[in-house]
Amino acid sequence: MLMTDATRNSMPDMIEMRGKNKIILIAVEEMSELIKALLKNINRGKDNREDILMELTDVSMFLEYVKMIYGFKDEEIRDYQDKVTHEKVMPKIEAWKKSQLQH
Ligand SMILES: [Mg+2]
């Protein structure tokens, strides 16, 4: 995620100050807020793009904390994403494309 050096540099102190488990619980709370905003948008047809942006920003930030707490590097995540893309996503897309040709 794009973030300023000031933001990234503040994260270890924040983790030490609040404690790892508290930060993880806040991350979970933020994810639930994003889920709620998305459900409102889809289920109730609510025009809440600003809410989604705010919650997405919170989740992005706290995912960075979770990555830092568990020691996941961006490269490790990128490599796993690439593996999932090749092993799971691309075969599904190929199967879907083939099924589209049969119609
Ligand atoms: Mg939030």
Image: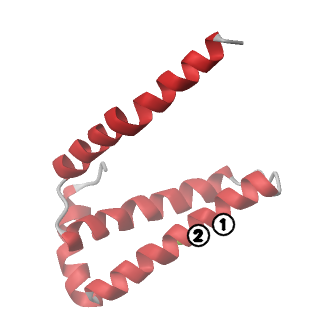
Viewer-nearest residue: 51 or 84: 84
Q: Amino acid at mark 2?
A: Glu
Q: How is the image coloured?
A: secondary structure
Q: Residue at x 17, y 56 (%)?
A: 73
Considering only vertical position in the picture, is 102 above or below 84?
above
Asked if labels 1 and 2 touch by Cβ distance under 8 angstroms, the answer is yes
Q: Amino acid at mark 1?
A: Lys
Considering only vertical position in the picture, is 90 above or below 8?
above
Q: Which mark is residue 47?
A: none
Q: Position of residue 103 (x, y in %)?
A: 72, 12
Q: Is the distance from the Cβ of mark 2 to the nearest ligand 1 atom less than 8 Å?
A: yes
**In terms of image quadrants, where is residue 91?**
top left
Q: Residue at x 60, y 56 (%)?
A: 52
Viewer-nearest residue: 14 or 71: 71
Q: Secondary structure at mark 1?
A: helix
Q: Residue at x 30, y 88 (%)?
A: 18
Q: Which mark is residue 36?
A: 1
Q: Which residue is mark 2?
A: 33
Q: Residue at x 27, y 40 (%)?
A: 83
**In terms of image quadrants, where is residue 59?**
bottom left
Q: Position of residue 4 (x, y in %)?
A: 25, 55
